[in-house]
Amino acid sequence: MSGSDRTPGAVPEGPEDAAVVVVDHSGTVLGCTADAAALIGTAAEELKGADVGELFTDAPDWQELRERVPETSFVSVQADLQRRSAQPLAVRLDLLPVRAAAEPRFLLRLMPANVADRRDEDEALLRAMFNQSGVGIAIHDTDLRLTRVNPFPADPGAPPAAERSAAEDREASPLGSRLGALLVIEDGAHIEARLRQVVETGEPLIDVVCRARLARSPERERTVSLAALPLRGRDGTVHGVAVTFTDVTEQESSRRRSVLVAAAASGLGRSLDVRRNAETLMDLVDLTETTLVGEEPTDFAVGTPLLRVAVADREGGWPSELYPLDSMIRVQDTESELLRTGSARIARDLTELRGRIGDDERRSRLLLPADAASFMVLPLHARGRVLGVVALWRTAGRAPFDEQDVALAEDIGSRAGLAIANARRYTRERRTAEALQRSLLPQPALDVTGAETAGIYVPGRTVAGTGGSWFDVITLSSTRVAFVVGTVVGHGLDAAAAMGRLQTAVRTLADLDPAPDELLTHLDDLVMQLAHRQQPGATNGTVRGATCIYAVHDPVTGRCSMASAGHPPPLLARADGSAADIVKLTAGAALGSGGAPFEPVELEPAPGDLFVFAAGSLADGSAQGLVAGHLAREAGARAHGPESAQELGQRILAPFLAQPPDDDAALLVARVRPSPEDSVAAWEYPADVERVADAREEAAAQLTRWGLDELVFTTELIVSELVTNAMRYAGGPVLLRLIRDQRLICEVSDPSQTQPHLRRARLTDEGGRGLYLVAQLTHRWGSRYTASGKTIWTEQLIDGPESE
């Protein structure tokens, strides 16, 4: 029997419990357990009476082994067990004295060496885990009461074991307790619920991160990562739960800070709205008034106005003792000096701060709620300017702010300051672009003889969505009115400026009174010239690729002609509600393409019919059909209602403005109407100068019927001059037409397309003074081409309110 001579052998099948042999003082076998008989391979009856030395390959020195046994312990050696019909087996032999027997007896405990070694490893591992402090180990029974726990430093604030008395150790012992009595109630309940799942299902938990704040120090943040394994008996029944846990408070705090910084950076980068960026910071944010409206921030001084733009409280409400949201406040000398320093400041104990504030209600309402225990103030800076301030506080139930919180706040604050500064610059550019855009658009509502119109412009949510869409209403000669809607490529200030150039060009061309298709042809040529002058590489705000639709309504004839350069056609809603359809108009190429003809279409709308022109996001791509369908339903239902064009346009837009569109939009609503029946008089004459007198007489008689006797003399002179020139130089027939509107309009049409021009006659000239005389007698005059020649028109003011 030797501790060094070990012959390997197979471990027999069966339980791994130790086999026991009972021997007397002389080494004679008195009996054995069934496990021993199975291990040796001999029946128990045959082993009785055998010499213990016969059980091993080498005869043991029984007397020496027996003498080594202490009084109350045992001796352990290794030997090779002799087995029948099998190779010897290396076993561990433990010799234990039996003290209660009448004669000296001993127990030989036999265990295969590899089983014994594994048990030694298990016990060593268990001792190491329970005696070390890097990983906490706790054993819970099925009622989740602690039955065993290692000396893990659960409370960093507790005194070390060497400084505690035995009574304090017993009092502090958690054995027999449940987690609900050791941890903060909500933390203990959460962990127990997870452990209960392990007991009931037998499924382990791996790497579960939980808050585990101790009940005796709830303000101290504590996070653990735990693993829970079911403890099963041999029958598979769960007898408890073994839990290992490590303190990951610092790692989790660092992870949360990283996540918070990343979330703040992502949230602050998504919006270019000053208030939304402030709301992303939560808690309490005050911004200077100039920052909020996009102006350049001024030097931060005492009394600088701050607007409270975002507030949040952990409990969900907002303390009534603090200034509410959207309050205008002004800081005092202490606060302004603090904000100008540029770094965050903390106050772990608010006693001194409350003492300085005293009974000053304005300052206490600015900063501190009643339950605040610690406080932090963070100035928001960007490019050397103070943009605002973030104030944060914690109640007594939470750990006070520390230097790590300051570093985190300053990291987020620097990102927030830059985001708010960018948002301020964006706000300023957006306000400028909107102001320029709106200044170039006509007045929203216009009521003229030929139509009642209302235009609505909706800017996009961002600078990138403002400046491209526009509309215009142009009054033409002879009570006619032009409707113009278009979209310019690009957005922002450049697009608004390009829109202004295009609008000016349309108005200039419209003054020449060409047909819609001719106007777009000239406009296309002009856009090509403007595009060639643009700097190479410039794409934002270019007039090339712009779309435009131009429509002219004549209330005298009741006809409306229109043409389109790449723009969607308008909707025509009948006044009787019978139909609301998109006008069948072929949209030509966008402006700047060059050479492509524009196909006009002519309509005869009934009195009260409604045209709805859309641009931008209301007429863009795949949304056009949906928008047109909605406009058709709305306009068709209300075309003949009591609503004004302005009210109708707002109703049509209401569903689309629930959320501001990404791109801007323009809507022009025009309800057409004819001229009054008795407001027009017309005569046709052959090319006979003798008929000029007839023209004068008939014009004078008509003015008398209209009650315009004060204009008879000047009108006779105008008619005489224009009709004479037409008959003498253009031939016949000559058409004379008078229109009584807000002004008196006189038209003379002839078959010639030679345009008259005004010149100053010399003293020796016999003629050339007729148009000069007409220009002096009228308020405005001009000429336009027609399909059969030209028309010269004049306007005279009518005395009274209508001429204003």
Image (spheres, helix red, strand yellow):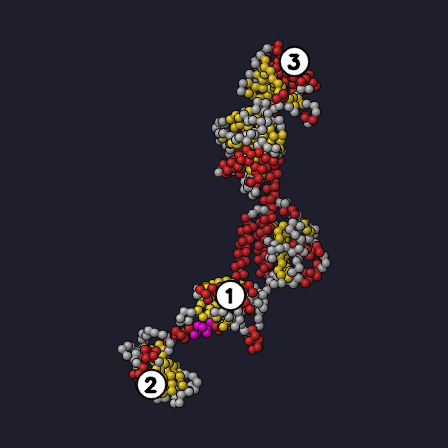
Residue occupying the point 55% across, 28% down: 551
Q: Nearer the viewer, mark 1 or mark 3?
A: 1
Q: Residues within 10 Å of mark 3 (few under 14, many from 20)?
A: some
Q: Position of residue 308 (x, y in %)?
A: 64, 51
Q: Residues within 10 Å of mark 2 (few under 14, many from 20)?
A: many
Residue at image mark 1:
192
Spatial CA span between label 1 and label 3: 109 Å
Q: Position of residue 505 (x, y in %)?
A: 57, 30
Q: Nearer the viewer, residue 314 or 421?
A: 314
Q: Position of residue 599 (x, y in %)?
A: 49, 27
Residue 460 visible? The answer is no
Residue occupying the point 55% across, 49% down: 269
Q: Nearer the viewer, mark 2 or mark 1?
A: 1
Q: Position of residue 329 (x, y in %)?
A: 68, 51
Q: Nearer the viewer, residue 753 or 219?
A: 219
Q: Amino acid at mark 3?
A: Glu
Dot label at residue 323: none
What's the magenta region? 123-129
Residue at image mark 3:
697
- Secondary structure mostly seen in magenta is helix
Dot label at residue 29: 2
Spatial CA span between label 2 and label 3: 159 Å
Confirm whether the magenta stretch covers residue 534: no
Relative to 682, say whether 297 is above or below.
below
Residue occupying the point 65% across, 49% down: 326
Relative to 178, say whether 488 is above or below.
above
Considering only order in the chain, which callout, 1 or 2, is on the residue closer to the N terminus? Answer: 2
Q: Amino acid at mark 1?
A: Glu
